[in-house]
Image (tube, rainbow, N blue to C red):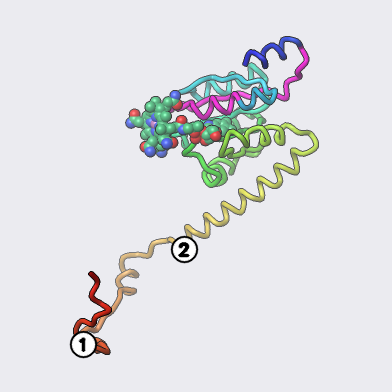
Amino acid sequence: MPYIEAEQKGGEVRSNGKILLATVKGDVHDIGKNIVGVVLQCNNYEIIDLGVMVSGEEILRTAREENVDIIGLSGLITPSLDEMVSVAKEMQRQNISLPLMIGGATTSKAHTAVKIEPGFNLDQVVHVSNASRAVNVASSLLSEDNKSHYINEIQEEYQAIRERFTERQKLGRRVSLQQARVNKLTTDWDTYTPPTPANPGFTASEILI
Ligand code: B12
């Protein structure tokens, strides 16, 4: 950090972009978010870290005031998944057109594709599984040349995930109780004759000591 700060004071380094990071409301886990922040800072991104248990309102207010380029949300407990959906919906409602990075152990590509991305069409939401991927994702999202190609790839991938999810749901659909009774397994043990073993009784090869 001292080296990075000294370099920045010297005015030699131009920021690659400003990223707001926060662990969402109700969640205290911040180890992963902090790692992501350091990795991004080491790659010349300016980080505004709002800490933990941050409400959507504060995240979006700061994003506007600080004119950030990307919002990054972290969450490790299950309720954080819903909180992230709420923040994304609120971004949409407030017309905040910024890329959104989603991270933290409970988050997933599937959750991002199925629950967050639909309806989020002002910019792109991307699930980032690991701090080491954050730099590539951020630079693609902010690249003038590469952004639309990158977004197309992500959208195709997420669309395929949603289709698989819908298919799986159809396959797993439950039938009515009446239908289940009609489909019940019928057995007929009265007429069943068990097969006769070739060599009745124990044989040497079956005795394990
Ligand atoms: C450390 C820890 C704690 C510490 C947190 C300290 C801190 N300052 O963060 C303490 C002890 C406080 C804690 C508390 C609790 N914890 Co806890 N905790 C953990 C533990 C052991 C490790 C989490 C961790 O730091 N992992 C390492 C980091 C590096 O990984 P990561 O966060 O996933 O981050 C990586 C990526 O996901 C990604 N990433 C993360 N965030 C972001 C953000 C962006 C923008 C991007 C791009 C990428 C990114 O980059 C990171 C580096 O590669 C996990 C279990 C586990 N083994 O994972 C449980 C775990 C997360 N905790 C759990 C629980 C239940 C709790 C409590 C509710 C327990 C309780 N009953 O009080 C409380 C939470 C209270 C609350 N309201 O949040 C559960 C969550 C289960 C669930 N699905 O809901 C877990 C999974 C344990 C378990 N198996 O039950 N916990």
Question: Which picture quadrant has residue 48?
Answer: top right
In x, y percent, where is residue 23? 50, 26
* Magenta segment boundaries in residue numbering: 11-38
Which residue is the site of mark 1?
200
In x, y percent, where is residue 72? 58, 29
Kind of residue at disc 2? Leu
Q: At x 52% / y 44%, what residue is drawn?
A: 111
Q: At x 64% / y 29%, what residue is drawn?
A: 95
> In front: 174, or 32?
32
Task: Specify whether 128 is left or right of 179.
Answer: right
In x, y percent, where is residue 191? 22, 89
- Quadrant in the picture for the C terminus: bottom left
Mark seen at residue 23: none
Q: At x 72% / y 42%, what residue is drawn?
A: 150
- Quadrant in the picture for the N terminus: top right
* 203 drawn magenta: no
Question: Which picture quadrant has residue 28?
Answer: top left
Contact, mark 2 vs mark 1 (Cβ under 8 Å): no
Task: Specify whether 126 is left or right of 184.
Answer: right
Can residue 84 be seen? no
Which residue is the site of mark 2?
171
- Counting residues from the start of the chain, the first of labels 2 and 1 encountered is 2
Q: Is residue 32 above or below residue 107?
A: above
Query: Regarding mark 2 in the picture, which secondary structure is present there?
Result: helix
Quarter of the render that holds ligand 1? top left
